[in-house]
Amino acid sequence: MDHIFELKGSWKGGLSGVGKISTDHLTTDVSIPASMGGSEVGTNPDELLLSSSAACYFMTIGLYLERNKVQFEDISISSKLIVSEKGRLHVESIYHYPVIYLTKEPDAALSEQIYKIAHQAEEGCMITRAIKGNVKVIVEPSVKQV
């Protein structure tokens, strides 16, 4: 079964232009970031790629933890996307720093299992698989007690 997602969009202007995108659950302005010479209205494709990568990744961790019957309280994440100007402007890498919160202090075996799951989730995330070969995705997980 295929899952189809649709977007409608429009763009006015050039480098300092502004656009709008709309999906079933997201409507936002888009533009080129000020650091790249744009107007920085709304979000931009770099933030959208980072957002989809991070959301897919932390959802996948949650699914993998559940499948492995690892009880957790919460998952938080901070992520960053690096755009390189070496050669042609391109997304070089994405870094994810997930924190898996547990209600009790984990022993060494549970910590090791969670770190393994966190790395497997990066490989299982469909956004990571979509950009594989073009963008490095680096995961640096940690485990904390609530």
Image (cartoon, grey):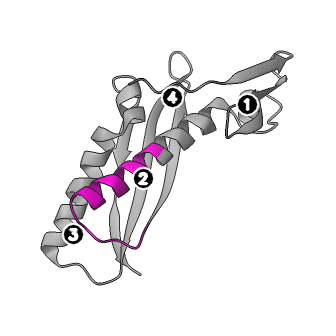
Q: Is residue 71 above or below residue 105?
A: above
Q: Horizontal and vertical percent for residue 99?
A: 40, 65
| Disc 4 and disc 1 in contact, CB within 8 angstroms | no
Type of amino acid under label 3: Ser
Secondary structure under tag 4 reads: strand
Residue ID for mark 4: 91
Does dot 3 land on a helix, a strand or a loop? helix
C-alpha separation, residue under disc 2 versus residue under disc 4: 20 Å
| Residue at position x 24%, y 63% in the image | 114
Residue at horizontal 44%, vertical 35%?
Answer: 93
Q: Nearer the viewer, mark 1 or mark 2?
A: 1
Residue at x 72% of width, y 22% of height: 8
Res. 32 visible in picture: no
State yes or no: residue 109 in magenta. no
- Reading the image, the residue beneath label 2 is 58
- Residue 132 point in image, percent of width and height: 35, 27
Q: Amino acid at mark 1?
A: Ser
Quarter the C terminus occupies: bottom left
- Magenta includes 60? yes
Which range of residues does the magenta coloring cover?
56-74
Name which of mark 3 and mark 4 comes first in the sequence. 4
Determine the secondary structure under disc 2.
helix
Q: Looking at numbered disc 4 in the image, what kind of residue is underneath it? A: Val
Real-space Cα separation, disc 3 to disc 4, in angstroms: 32 Å
| Residue carrying label 1 | 22
Q: Which of disc 2 and disc 1 is earlier in sequence?
A: 1
Pick whichever, 31 or 15, lies toward us: 31
